[in-house]
Image: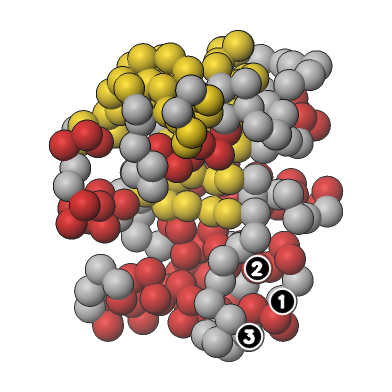
């Protein structure tokens, strides 16, 4: 599903953010990426979204070689990828229903389909009664559940979550991870960037450990780490 071969990237010449990354993630895997600030985790996410391009190496996602994806093709490429951010990134002037529906309107899903799928997704994340609420009327945990619903509404093959629990307390953090695990159980490949080692060690999934732009550990499912 995701393959990086000898991938390096620099924002400034001579100062690599990523160095010779080799990584393969199979379809249906759930993978954590951990490491200190500046280890290259966010750069990896940007490459997978084609927000940035590698200075060297090759990235393949699904059946697409990213170096061959032209600028005008990027929106279509990203339809197969759901993204969840630490800061939620909801549209403040639209209610919960409209925030989720927006993701479908962008790809021109028929109105009847939207009216059926959005309530079903809201029920899945436990927010069926909040559909008229605006983001500033929701707790942080509720906002992140809306963000997850929006990320999953178009049934992406891959879900990228960049510090999805970073602004949440322990209870809400575990609720968010439960939703991500449920998405994975339905077949979505999930990659989670996080600093939360308590969650990483409790869930016992595959763990990629990064440091200074390189992968220093790749621990199989069930792995446990004591530092990152």
Question: In this picture, is 214 found above or below 139?
Answer: above
Which residue is denoted by mark 3 in the rendering? 133
**Callout 3–callout 2 Cβ contact below 8 Å:** no
Judged from the image, the secondary structure of the residue bearing numbered disc 1 is loop
Judged from the image, the secondary structure of the residue bearing numbered disc 3 is loop
Q: CA distance from mark 3 to mark 1?
A: 7 Å
Q: CA distance from mark 2 to mark 1?
A: 6 Å
Which of disc 1 and disc 3 is earlier in sequence? 3
Q: How is the image coloured?
A: secondary structure
**Disc marking residue 159:** none
Q: Is residue 123 visible?
A: no
Residue 147's spot in the image, x, y percent?
55, 63
Q: Quadrant of residue 93?
A: bottom right
Q: Quadrant of the N terminus?
A: top left
Determine whether, in the image, residue 76 is placed left or right of residue 97: left
Q: Residue at x 43, y 14 (%)?
A: 20
Judge the density around disc 1: few (<14), some (14-19), many (≥20) Cα neighbours within 10 Å.
some
Q: Residue at x 55, y 16 (%)?
A: 215
Q: CA distance from mark 3 to mark 2?
A: 10 Å
Judge the density around disc 3: few (<14), some (14-19), many (≥20) Cα neighbours within 10 Å.
some
Outermost residue to the front? 13
**Callout 2–callout 1 Cβ contact below 8 Å:** yes
Q: Quadrant of the C terminus?
A: top right
Residue 200's spot in the image, x, y percent?
70, 29
Which of disc 2 and disc 3 is earlier in sequence? 3
Q: Is residue 122 visible?
A: yes
**Callout 3–callout 1 Cβ contact below 8 Å:** yes
**Disc marking residue 143:** 2
Which residue is denoted by mark 1 in the rendering? 138
Judged from the image, the secondary structure of the residue bearing numbered disc 2 is helix
Determine whether, in the image, residue 190 is placed left or right of residue 170: left
Judge the density around disc 2: few (<14), some (14-19), many (≥20) Cα neighbours within 10 Å.
many
């Amino acid at each position: 599903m995701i393959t990086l071969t000898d991938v390096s990237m620099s924002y400034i010449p001579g100062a690599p953010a990523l160095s010779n990354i080799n990584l393969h993630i199979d379809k249906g895997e759930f993978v954590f990426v951990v490491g200190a600030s500046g280890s290259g985790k966010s750069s990896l996410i940007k490459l997978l979204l084609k927000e940035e391009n590698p200075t060297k190496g090759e990235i393949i996602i699904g059946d697409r070689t990213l170096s061959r994806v032209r600028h005008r093709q990027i929106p279509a490429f990203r339809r197969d990828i759901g993204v969840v951010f630490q800061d939620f990134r909801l549209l403040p002037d639209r209610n919960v229903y409209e925030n989720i529906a927006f993701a479908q309107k962008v790809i021109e899903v028929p109105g009847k389909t939207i009216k059926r799928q959005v309530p079903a997704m809201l029920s899945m994340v436990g927010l069926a009664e909040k559909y008229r609420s605006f983001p500033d009327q929701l707790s942080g945990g509720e906002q992140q559940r809306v963000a997850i619903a929006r990320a999953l509404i178009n049934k992406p093959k891959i879900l990228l979550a960049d510090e999805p629990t970073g602004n949440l307390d322990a209870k809400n953090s575990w609720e968010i991870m439960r939703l991500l695990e449920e998405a994975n159980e339905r077949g979505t490949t999930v990659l989670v960037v996080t600093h939360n080692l308590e969650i990483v060690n409790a869930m016992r999934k595959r763990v990629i450990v990064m440091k200074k732009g390189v992968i220093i550990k790749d621990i199989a499912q069930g792995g446990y780490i004591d530092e990152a």
